[in-house]
Image (cartoon, helix red, strand yellow):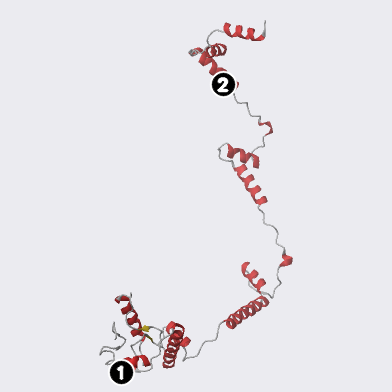
Amino acid sequence: MSYRKELQMSLELQPCGTNAAYQRHMKAGEQPCEPCVLANREQSRASYKPKKLDTSDLQPCGTRAAYQRHVRAGEQPCDACLEANRERNRARYKPKPRDTSKLKPCGTQAAYKRHRAAGEEPCDACKKANRDAFRARREALRKKSPALKPCGTHAAYQRHLKAGEQPCEPCRQGYRDYMKEYLRKKAEKAKNAALPVVAPENAHKAPCTDPRNGYIWDPRADGEGPGVVEARWRRAAFLCVSECPVVAHCRESRALAGGDGVWAGRIPERVS
């Protein structure tokens, strides 16, 4: 008789309440009875029963391994294990000895700082070296800083304002001269090709340009809205603060331009 047939006969002979009967129920597609289910559970528990831990080779308390064993088990390490862990950490993170051969000797600023860091009183040589280094650094910074402009210049005027002081009269005059020169240079850069005004009667027969600021004082062009013209005229009138040939011609040609010429920076929309 073959092994398979013998096994099948042995399974058939086993009564309910055994694991063999549980397997027979499953192979037949039947619902196992309660005794067979309990027998299968008991056999499963027996087969997967955890083995006992061999504690003969475990290190005793007071060692690093015992400390880790306490931690893995979720236990509070004992005092001996805590002290062993501290000793291990001290040995691992022990600071390396400092190489004193590379330290600067006394009489240098580095030695002065070393005295201060150690809480010691610096020696006289180190104090003198620190004073000399401080003076050298201060002199180097002084050489880099630009020289201050004297009073009577725009820089001195700004220096008075930053200090919260009232600018003196030379500085005020220097500021006025600076602004005049600034506006003159700005007008030269922005100046475009303007038609010269050679006579009062020709002042408004063509567009002209203020020689100081470059703004065009001319009638409204085609496609130019009244708001754009008014804004341009206002900017020109704001900068028109001194006598210039254009303003003089405009004043003289007021009657020639239809009685409504330019006056104080205002210009008519249309000039015949």
- Residue identified by numbered label 1: 252
Picture coordinates of residue 8 (x, y %)? Answer: 60, 8
- Check disc 2 and report its element: helix, strand or loop: helix
Which numbered tag is attached to residue 215? none
Rendered position, 185 above or below 226 = below
Picture coordinates of residue 176 (x, y %)? Answer: 42, 90
Q: In the orientation shown, which residue stands out farthest toward the right?
A: 101
Q: Quadrant of residue 121?
A: bottom right
Q: Quadrant of residue 107?
A: bottom right
Residues at circles 2 and 1 in contact by the CB criterion of under 8 Å? no
Rendered position, 127 above or below 32 = below
Q: Looking at this view, is 16 or 178 the one in front?
A: 178
Q: Residue at x 54, y 16 (%)?
A: 40
Please tell me how many numbered marks the rendered image carries. Answer: 2
Q: Looking at this view, is 61 or 209 the one in front?
A: 209
Q: In the orientation shown, which residue stands out farthest toward the left?
A: 259
Image quadrant for the C terminus?
bottom left
**Within-10-Å neighbours for mark 2: few <14, some 14–19, many 20+:** few
Picture coordinates of residue 23 (x, y %)? Answer: 55, 14
Q: Looking at this view, is 196 or 33 the one in front?
A: 196
Image quadrant for the N terminus?
top right
Q: Quadrant of residue 163?
A: bottom left
- Residue identified by numbered label 2: 45
Residue 137 visible somewhere in the drawing: yes
**Front: mark 2 or 1:** 1
Q: Amino acid at mark 2?
A: Arg
State how far apart marks 2 and 1 are (Cα): 122 Å
Which mark sits nearer the N-terminus, 2 or 1? 2
Q: Amino acid at mark 1?
A: Glu
Picture coordinates of residue 135 (x, y %)? Answer: 61, 81
